[in-house]
Image: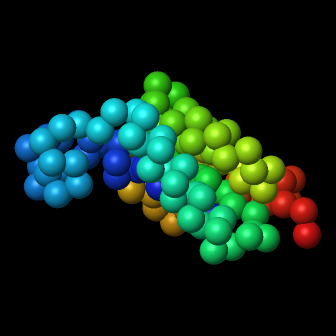
Amino acid sequence: MVNLFQNDSWIVNAPNNLQFKARYGNQKPHDDFIINAYRNLMTSIRQNNPKATIICALGNMDAAKKVSKWPNLIKLATTQLKDEKVHNLVLPFKNNGRHPKIVNQAAMAKQLIVFIEEHVKW
């Protein structure tokens, strides 16, 4: 499972942040840049793991909000792969403004188990 973009969802909007400058320089990355980078990472993972089922997940924090662009960016990137063993899973936004607690982690684990049972062929 690959679970990326949670931290990117805020850093791309913080051009004065040192992490932003280290990653992107002085210009905010456009969506095509993000989609291509994600697709290239999945391609690399596939090349190193040719038989694996890959679940591209997005955790239950801000990036998973209904108004968030991040789930769609992941979908666009993975659709371009045309790989039937790459799946997307966006975990429901927990809406409490904090990092997941044990109860949230347990809920996500249950959702992931159900997702694997439904989508992964053994």
Q: Quadrant of residue 15?
A: top left
Q: For the point 39% across and 40% down, which residue is it?
A: 33
Query: Which residue sits at x=18%, y=38%?
Result: 27
- Whole-percent x and y of residue 90? 61, 44
Position of residue 68 measured from the top left corner of the image (x, y, whole percent): 45, 31
Residue 63 image point, x, y percent: 44, 41
Q: Does residue 115 lie above or below 48 as drawn?
A: above
- Compared across the picture, whether 1 is left or right of 97 comes to right
Q: Is residue 40 visible?
A: yes
**In this picture, residue 6 sits left or right of residue 12:** right
Q: Nearer the viewer, residue 108 or 82?
A: 82
Left or right relative to 49: residue 41 = left
Q: Quadrant of residue 111?
A: bottom right
Q: Please tell me which residue lies in front, 88 or 64.
A: 88
Labels in figure, total: 0
List the single residue furthest toward the right. 122
Q: Residue at x 91, y 69 (%)?
A: 122
**Point 46% across, 61% down: residue:** 101
* Image spot of residue 67 (x, y percent): 46, 25
Q: How is the image coloured?
A: rainbow
The relative height of residue 44 versus residue 76 in the rendered view (above or below) is below
Closest to the observer, 114 or 29: 29
Q: Is residue 115 visible?
A: no
